[in-house]
Image: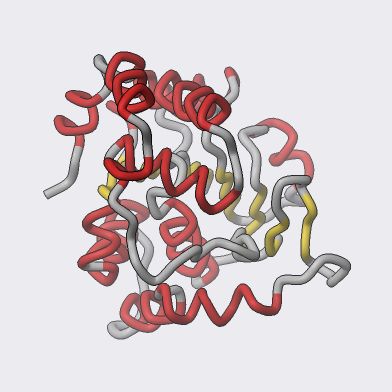
Amino acid sequence: MLVFIGGMQRSGSTYIFNIARELLKLTGSVYVEASADLRGAMERSRDADHIVLKDHAGSGPLTAAILRREVRTLCTIRDIEGALASWMDTFGFDFHAAIVHLTEWFAMYRKIQPFCMTIAFEVIENDPVGAARTVARYLETPYPATFVDTISRRYSKDNVRKLVQDIELGREGVRDIGFSYYSEETFFHRRHVSSSTRRNPQQYFSSEQLRQIAKQFANDRSLLESTKTP
């Protein structure tokens, strides 16, 4: 099976990625890659039973394959100000760079939205087991009765906060990408869980920045609302 996790930045996509990865491991070998390079991943996967890609912007070949329904696609979404504030706060991006990255994500999402399963950040936060069951149904993977509950707990925020303490530069299986470094197995970054409390994004930005966000993404808010899972 070919699977793409194409969530908005800081919207729970790494949680969904790990749920999908664990479910697919029950039915064969899984190759994972933090990229949208579908063709390259297929060559590098060495005949794995499943390929799972995760990225915040799709490539032409990947998008075309999604539109042909050759790739099962899961996207996570979040309120725009919350995504921008968390992206900047966690990884140190400046305001302009964060806007550019999110604009690129929306350009992809508008194309693939009708062909993907969308899961809202609020669902992942408030009902992680329910979100994991949604992934299992979408991928149509058989699993033991308690398995989804088990992997949901494994990748809860509290457990991830402990897990990322072992992600250190120089260790095998840790990749340095300049602004951060992450586990090549789980894709969790060293600073993935930045805080146990959520900041009010309306207080994070200046009035001018809030006006710029509203103007930049004026046509995108309704798209998020119309595709949000109940």
| Total residue callouts | 0
213 relative to 65 in the view: left or right:
left
Q: Quadrant of residue 96?
A: top right
Q: Nearer the viewer, residue 55 or 207?
A: 207
User: Which residue occupies 69% across, 31% down?
Assistant: 39
User: Which residue occupies 43% across, 18% down?
Assistant: 107
28 relative to 214 in the view: left or right:
right
84 relative to 164 in the view: left or right:
left
Q: Is residue 118 visible?
A: yes
Query: Which residue is most to the right?
Result: 170
Q: Position of residue 112 (x, y in %)?
A: 38, 25
Residue 225 lies, with reference to residue 103, above or below; the image says below
Residue 156 lies, with reference to residue 88, above or below; the image says below
Q: Nearer the viewer, residue 130 or 69?
A: 130
Q: Nearer the viewer, residue 119 or 98?
A: 98
Q: Nearer the viewer, residue 54 or 73?
A: 54
Q: How is the image coloured?
A: secondary structure
Q: Position of residue 137 (x, y in %)?
A: 27, 58
Q: Is residue 73 visible?
A: no
Residue 35 lies, with reference to residue 112, above or below; the image says below
Q: Quadrant of residue 210?
A: top left
Q: Position of residue 63 (x, y in %)?
A: 50, 23
User: Which residue occupies 84% across, 71% down?
Assistant: 171
User: Which residue occupies 54% across, 68% down?
Assistant: 25
Residue 78 lies, with reference to residue 196, above or below; the image says above
Q: Quadrant of residue 141?
A: bottom left
Query: Which residue is most to the front?
Result: 207
Q: Position of residue 97 (x, y in %)?
A: 57, 28
